[in-house]
């Protein structure tokens, strides 16, 4: 074997040893301590691999800042079925709650000079590259894009999710909005 062949072999063996040292492959198996479930969660079955919350946390961060930077693209079939939405409005100053049904593209007067507009309703919300779309025509992950307007100035704009309010990007100190149920269009008889 030539000197260069021996140098390559030495390098490969040394590099492998360094990689093993940094990755902790010592051959010893550490005893795993079962994680305690958070309040309101069930414990994992014994022997279940720990769940990595990183992807969920990344998803929450991605959704937290979604206002309108992405285009909403819905099929004609989705638009035809989902024409209005039922919301629960809470006036944070008085605590008064009101259920309202608003047509997509329409608005409702909250108080003098203040209107809440429904810009889009997505029954099965998904992000595909730079587009927000619906994965299906069923209410599996419904979300509504809202705009709160005072006079002619937008004071709040963002998404409200029915099942995942922690993803809501619509925030306003005066009015809290909760998506109760998207309302599919009624079939004509």
Image (spheres, rainbow, N blue to C red):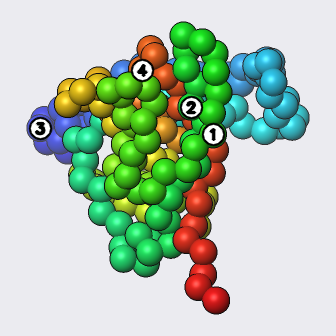
Mark 1 vs 3: CB contact within 8 A: no
For the view shown, which residue lies furthest in the bottom direction? 189
In the image, is 147 to the left or to the right of 77? Answer: left
How many residues crowd mark 4 within 10 Å: few (<14), some (14–19), many (20+)?
Answer: some
Q: Which residue is labeled 4 in the image?
A: 172
Q: Which is closer to the viewer, label 2 or label 3?
A: 2
Residue to which mark 3 is pinned? 4
Q: Are marks 4 and 2 in contact (CB under 8 Å)?
A: no
The residue under the point 50% across, 72% down is 81
Report the residue at 69% width, 32% height from top: 50
User: Callout 1: 10 Å neighbours few (<14), some, many (20+)?
Assistant: some
Q: Residues within 10 Å of mark 3 (few under 14, many from 20)?
A: few
187 left or right, relative to 152: right
- Compute the Cα span from label 4 to label 2: 11 Å
Q: Which residue is mark 1?
A: 99
The answer for how far apart the CA atoms under marks 2 and 1 are is 6 Å
- Report whether 9 appears left or right of 186: left
Q: Nearer the viewer, mark 4 or mark 1?
A: 1
Give the secondary structure at mark 1. strand
Quarter assignment of residue 103: bottom left
> What quarter of the picture does the N terminus occupy?
top left
Q: Earlier in the sequence, mark 1 or mark 3?
A: 3
Left/right of residue 113 with respect to residue 56 in the rendered view: left
């Amino acid at each position: 074997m030539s000197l260069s062949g021996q140098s390559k072999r030495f390098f490969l063996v040394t590099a492998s040893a360094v990689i093993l040292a940094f990755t902790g492959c010592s051959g010893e198996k550490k005893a795993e301590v079962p994680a305690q479930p958070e309040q309101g969660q069930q414990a994992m079955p014994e022997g279940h691999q720990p769940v990595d919350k990183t992807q969920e946390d990344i998803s929450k961060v991605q959704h937290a800042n979604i206002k309108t930077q992405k285009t909403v693209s819905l099929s004609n079939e989705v638009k035809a079925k989902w024409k209005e939405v039922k919301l629960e409005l809470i006036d944070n100053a008085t605590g008064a709650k009101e259920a309202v049904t608003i047509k997509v593209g329409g608005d409702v007067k909250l108080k003098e000079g203040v209107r809440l507009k429904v810009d889009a309703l997505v029954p099965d919300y998904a992000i595909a590259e730079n587009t927000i779309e619906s994965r299906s025509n069923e209410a599996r992950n419904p979300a509504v894009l809202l705009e709160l307007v005072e006079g002619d100035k937008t004071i709040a704009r963002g998404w409200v999710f029915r099942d995942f309010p922690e993803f809501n990007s619509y925030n306003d100190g005066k009015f809290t909005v909760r998506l109760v149920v998207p309302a599919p269009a009624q079939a004509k008889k």
